[in-house]
Amino acid sequence: MADSTKHAAANSDSGSGEAGKASDGSTKKEGASVIFKLYCLAVLTVMAASYTVLMRYTRTVEGVRYYSTTTVFVTECAKMFFTLCILLKEHKGSIRKVSQELKGNIIGKPTEMLKMSVPSIVYAIQNNMTFIGLSNLDAATYQVTYQMKIPCTALLSVMMLGRSLGGMQWIAVFVLTGGVILVQGIGGEAVSHTSGTDGNYVVGLTALTIAVFCSGFAGVYFEKLLKGSDTSLWVRNVQMYSWGMLSAFMGVVMHDWQNVRENGFLYGYTPLVWLVVLLGSGGGIYTSIVVKYTDNIMKGFAAAAAIVLSTIASIMFMGLVVGWMFVLGASLVIAAIFMYGLPKTNTERLPTKKGGTTQNV
Ligand code: C5P
C-alpha cells in the first residue's frame, strides 16, 4: 500500500482537489499517471477477489462462527488506523499538524462532517448485507446478483454526478455485466441455491439486493463529496470512518450484543478472519484511491477483471476446469473494457456543464 498511498498523498498534497490544475489555472488533462491508475486498479482487483473468496470460506466452513457485525466494526477501525498513519506520514510525523488538520475539518466543518455520514452509514449497511448474502448464498449466485451493482452504479453516476456515457459506453456496461454473469456461471455452482444446510435463499437474495443499491448510492455519493470540494482524500476518509465506526458499532449492539456479552467481542477470530479484516480494510482504502483517480464505473470494471483473473488463477493453480461459458464471459469482459475506453477516460474531476452539455474533464 505504501507506494500508492505516497503517490495519492502527494497528489492530495499538491491539490486536495487542485491536482490537475496547471500553473496558469487551466485544468490539465491528466492528474495521476495511467500507470498509477492501473496499479491501483490491479491491487484493488486482487484484494477484492481474495476478500470475497476468504470471507465466504470463513462464513461457511465448519466450526465456531464469528459475529460478522464485529468484523465490520473491526474493519472500520483498521481503515481509520491506516488512514491516520498515512496522514501522519503526509505531515512528516507531526501529530500536532495532523490534529490541527483534523480539528479544522471535523469540529470546524460540522456540515461537511454531517454530509459524510450519508455514504458512511449506507456503506455500513452494505457491508453487513454482503456478509448476510455470503452466509446464505452459494458463491456463484452471490457473485452474479452482486454484479447488478455495475449498471446500478452507472445509472446513479449519470443521475447524481451529471456524468454522460456515450452509446458505446452504455453497451460496454451491459456487456460487462453479462460477461461477469457468464463467468460466474461456471462449474454449475449456480444450480445449488444455498451454501449449506442453514442457508436461506430469500434472506440472502434480499440482503444482496439491498447491498447492490447501497454500493451504487454510497459509492457515487462519496465520489460527489470527494470531487466536489477541496478537502483531501485522507481527511474525507477520516470523516467517513468516524461515522463508519459509529454505525458499525450500532450494528453490533443491535444484532449481536447478547452474543458478544456472553462470548466476547472477538469470538471465533481465527488468523483467517484477521486476514479478512486486513483485506477488507486494504480494499476499502484502495477503493477510495481508485474513486479519487478514476471513478466508480471504472471500479466496476476492475472488479470484473478481478473475477476473471481469480478464475484463471484457479484454473492454473487449483486445476479448475472451465467450459465455454467462462471463455465467452471472459471474452465479453475483455471486450467491454476496450469498448468503454479504459483507461483513456479521465474522470478525476466532476463533469462541468458547458453550453448546456455535460463534459467529463
Ligand atoms: O462493493 P463495493 O465496491 O461497493 O464496496 C466498496 C467498499 O469500499 C465498501 O466496503 C466500503 O466500506 C469501502 N470504502 C472505504 N472507503 C471509502 C469508500 C469505500 O473503505 N472511501
Image (cartoon, helix red, strand yellow):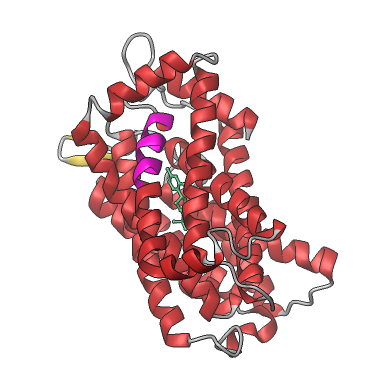
Name the side, left or right, on which 54 lies relative to 340: right
**Residue beneath the point at 66% across and 86% down:** 188
Q: Is residue 8 visible?
A: no
Question: Does the segment drawn in magenta span residue 137?
Answer: no
Question: Magenta: predominant secondary structure element?
Answer: helix
**Residue beneath the point at 43% across and 72% down:** 208
Residue 280 horizontal/vertical position (percent): 56, 52
Q: Is residue 357 visible?
A: yes
Name the side, left or right, on which 36 lies relative to 211: right
Q: In which quarter of the image is the N terminus?
A: top right
**Quick one: 31 or 122, which is closer to the camera?**
122
Which corner quadrant of the image does residue 103 belong to? Answer: top left
Which corner quadrant of the image does residue 306 belong to? Answer: bottom right
Residue 57 horizontal/vertical position (percent): 66, 70
Q: Which residue reaches farthest left?
A: 356
**Residue beneath the point at 41% across and 55% down:** 169
